Image (cartoon, rainbow, N blue to C red):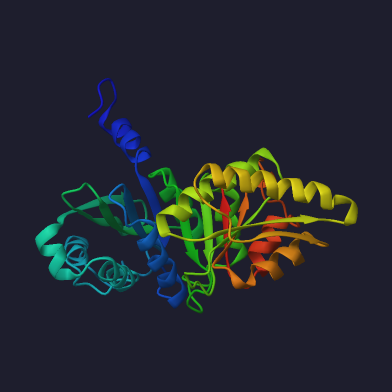
């Protein structure tokens, strides 16, 4: 471990040197599409992928008469049909086959007690000889959003991916629910992607207003595009004809930054009108519409009615908020 740091501090510092992706799975097709994208984004040896399923505290396990020790052992061996286990196992098998796991990956497990719940938090990690990690986490929390945000604190992560269409009913409901995706988008310190009808190969549309935050978004999105080999386009929206000159300056500045990073923009777009409507319409043919952080913190970051929030809610395709 790093000299002068505790084991915990050294682990956090090591994780900061990695490209870490947190993928929230709920059994829906969209959450697995998000996982497939994460697999491409995290294919390099310096990237780790953590699959997360959040379940409610207790969920009737005590009244079901389960023996805690046996339940934990069975869960860690993938033998117990607990909520989320099969979703995580499916995700694991999408990333690496079971035969490969046995021969090329070191497997380790961990457990943490949770007050009021007989099983607590459990995880299984897989690490190969290059140091690349895949982690499956079954987390207990009072809410899905709270569990996701708590997991970030155990990270950190560069990106959180949520599927937009969850399973109907129960605790694992639609991840595009104000209590879940919006709360995660508001409070997560890292970039957040809401995957919706996610199909790769159509490139990223970067929306810029010329601000420092927007330029930082362009820089980070460019690095991300290199990881997946995605083409990049730029859009700026002016409210009226008088703002067209500024919008043109915005896309020109973003294009120059991309070219300095050896990326040639595929399309450079300038639109006039309502920013939300124009972004949603222009983004229809792209894999992602990408918007930068406003630079605010807490609840002020994505106040209701903001462009970013409304695009995230109403866009026809996947939306990424970069910070």
The count of marks equals: 0
* Res 253 seen here: yes
At 69% from the left edge and 50% from the top edge, which residue is drawn? Answer: 251
Q: Residue furthest bottom?
A: 168
Comparing 305 with 158, the one in front is 158
Residue 100 falls in image quadrant? bottom left
Q: Position of residue 276 (x, y in %)?
A: 74, 62
Identify whether 41 is placed above or below 61: above
Q: Position of residue 278 (x, y in %)?
A: 75, 65
Quarter the C terminus occupies: top right
Comparing 158 with 141, the one in front is 158
Comparing 283 with 121, the one in front is 283
Left or right, 47 with reference to 246: left
Q: Position of residue 137 (x, y in %)?
A: 32, 58
Residue 86 falls in image quadrant? bottom left
Comparing 212 with 157, the one in front is 212
At 36% from the left edge and 70% from the top edge, which residue is drawn? Answer: 60
* Res 298 seen here: no
Left or right, 274 with reference to 143: right
At 73% from the left edge and 56% from the top edge, which residue is drawn? Answer: 307
Left or right, 115 with reference to 192: left
Q: Position of residue 302 (x, y in %)?
A: 67, 51
Residue 97 falls in image quadrant? bottom left
Quarter the N terminus occupies: top left
């Amino acid at each position: 471990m790093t000299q002068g740091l505790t084991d915990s501090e050294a682990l956090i510092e090591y994780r900061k040197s990695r490209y870490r992706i947190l993928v929230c799975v709920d059994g829906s097709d969209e959450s697995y599409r998000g996982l497939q994208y994460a697999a491409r984004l995290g294919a390099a040896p310096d990237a780790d992928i953590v699959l997360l399923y959040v379940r409610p505290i207790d969920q009737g396990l005590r009244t079901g008469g389960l023996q805690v020790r046996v339940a934990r052992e069975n869960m860690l061996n993938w033998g117990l049909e607990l909520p989320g286990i099969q979703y995580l196992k499916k995700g694991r098998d999408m990333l690496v086959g079971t035969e490969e796991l046995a021969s090329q990956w070191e497997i380790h497990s961990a457990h943490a007690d949770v007050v009021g719940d007989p099983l607590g938090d459990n995880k299984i990690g897989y690490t190969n000889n290059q140091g690349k990690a895949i982690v499956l986490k079954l987390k207990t929390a009072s809410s899905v959003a709270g569990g996701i945000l708590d997991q970030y604190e155990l990270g950190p992560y560069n990106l959180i991916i949520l599927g937009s269409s969850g399973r109907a009913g129960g605790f694992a409901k639609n991840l595009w629910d104000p209590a879940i995706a919006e709360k995660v988008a508001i409070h997560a310190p890292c970039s957040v992607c809401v995957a919706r009808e996610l199909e790769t190969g159509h490139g990223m549309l970067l929306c810029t207003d010329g601000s420092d935050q927007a330029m930082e978004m362009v820089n980070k999105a460019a690095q991300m595009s290199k990881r997946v080999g995605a083409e990049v386009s730029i859009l700026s929206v002016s409210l009226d004809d008088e703002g067209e000159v500024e919008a043109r300056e915005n896309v020109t500045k973003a294009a120059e930054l991309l070219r300095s990073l050896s990326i040639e923009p595929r399309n450079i777009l300038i639109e006039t009108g309502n920013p939300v409507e124009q972004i949603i319409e222009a983004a229809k043919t792209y894999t992602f519409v990408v918007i930068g952080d406003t630079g605010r913190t807490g609840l002020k970051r994505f106040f209701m009615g903001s462009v970013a929030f409304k695009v995230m809610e109403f866009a026809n395709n996947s939306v990424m908020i970069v910070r």
